[in-house]
Amino acid sequence: MIQRRRNKEPTRREKRRLAILDAAREIFLQQGYGATSLHDIVSVSGGSLATLYGLFGGKAGLFRETIEQECQNFFGVLDSEDIDEQPLREALRIVARQFFDGVIQQPKMSLLRVVVAEAPQFPEVGATFYSAGPERGREMVSTYLEKQSRRGLLQVDDPVRAADVFISLVIGEYQMKVLCGEEVKLAPEEVDRHLDWVLDAFLKIYSHERLDPAMQVTGACGV
């Protein structure tokens, strides 16, 4: 009975880990990577430097886990949507909307600004972000497109290049605008029109030549 009670409660170490990650995220966003010290983080999160080093190995490890947590939160939405069970166009729209919202939401873009600003001096920062974020997103999209091509719903010879095309169509000029500090405000109908254009353009390029249009709606191809 005592063992069951313990299993239901987060350990003290896990609580400390989460507190440090929360503090680190806010301070990294406010001060940048280079200007942030571990003393700054501990002063907000509580605990000790020894605990922080024990959990993360230092500032680089802490920043890496902060980025990975943010990216996991972002991509976890796509995992939970059961994309493979959706009709093709609807699935692509879900993915497109997630990427588009990620571009125009300030908290997520603030992290990207930190990475862009710090990468020349701290190359490991850029490498960590690219691996956990853009590269992972590219892999997820390319895997999905390759699967749909095998099913006969798309004609994709190079899934990675097709993923690049899809993501580029989605984020368009908006990512650069936000990185340059411009606020992107679009009415819901404007977002819908943009996503419709993205899907029309992408499917025009990659739809199978002999594909019945009804299959794009139903997602059915004998599979």
Image (cartoon, helix red, strand yellow):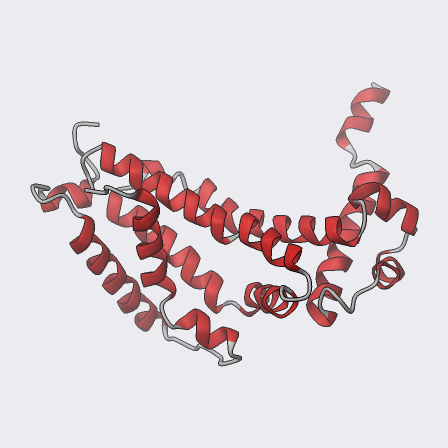
Residue 83 placement, left or right of 204 = right
Residue 55 or 97: which is nearer the viewer? 55
**Residue 157: x percent and y percent?**
23, 41
Eyeballing the image, is 27 above or below 63?
below
- The image quadrant where one finds the N terminus is top right
On the question of residue 70 being in view, the answer is: no
**Residue 107: x percent and y percent?**
59, 66
Q: List the single residue furthest toward the top.
A: 1
**Residue 86: x percent and y percent?**
30, 41
Residue 7 placement, left or right of 76 = right
Eyeballing the image, is 5 above or below 179?
above
Q: Residue at x 47, y 65 (%)?
A: 103
Q: List the single residue furthest toward the bottom.
A: 182
- The image quadrant where one finds the C terminus is top left
On the question of residue 53 being in view, the answer is: yes
Which quadrant would residue 216 be assigned to in this image? top left
Residue 57 placement, left or right of 143 = right
Q: Residue at x 41, y 72 (%)?
A: 174
Which quadrant would residue 210 be assigned to in this image? top left
Eyeballing the image, is 18 above or below 176?
above
Label count reads 0
Residue 21 placement, left or right of 89 = right
Q: Residue at x 77, y 59 (%)?
A: 23
Q: Residue at x 37, y 39 (%)?
A: 143
